[in-house]
Image (tube, helix red, strand yellow):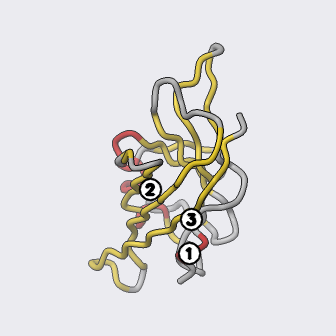
Amino acid sequence: MLREHLILPGGFKNVIQNGQATGFQVAVRTAYYRGVYLSLVEGYEVQVDGETFTKEHITFTVGAKPYTFDQLAKNTEGHWPYREPAILTVDKPGGLTRGMHDLVVTQHQRVSYMPVTSQTYVSKRKVALVI
């Protein structure tokens, strides 16, 4: 498991709609080296500078298709390859300020050969927001 590398460099930015920041994005990869079926991705928490955002405030995008975590639970055919980044879009009116931030991403997922066991992976990184 490569949990220390969940947060990918780059991909950390504010989401701008109609000239206003509506949230921010973080690029991540799965902790499981074989990739994972989408239905096994149970959720994420994202913490920025001590403020925690739960899966109810996060949209998960892989393969250019956005999902809620309820939708992922029902997706039995989609697969997230290890090398393909996913984008976590966090709803936060006003977005984040420019500069350095302490980022913690917690991933909850099941491994296909242990379907009743949930695995939790935590990754921390200091990141710069430039836009």
Mark 3 vs mark 1: give the one in front.
1
Whole-angstrom CA distance, mark 3 to mark 1, is: 22 Å
- The residue at the point 72 percent across, 53 percent down is 10
Image height of 49 relative to 76, above or below: above
Q: Residue 66: give x, y in percent of width and height.
A: 54, 42
Mark 1 vs mark 2: give the one in front.
1
| Mark 3, residue position | 79
Apparent side of residue 79 relative to residue 8 in the rendered image (left or right): left
- The residue at the point 69 percent across, 69 percent down is 83
Whole-angstrom CA distance, mark 3 to mark 2, is: 9 Å
Name the secondary structure under disc 3. strand
| Mark 1, residue position | 4
Disc 2 marks a residue whose amino acid type is Asn
On residue 39, the disc is none
| Mark 2, residue position | 75
Looking at the rendering, which quadrant does residue 107 occupy?
A: bottom left
Residue reaching furthest to the front: 100
Quadrant in which the C terminus is drawn? top right
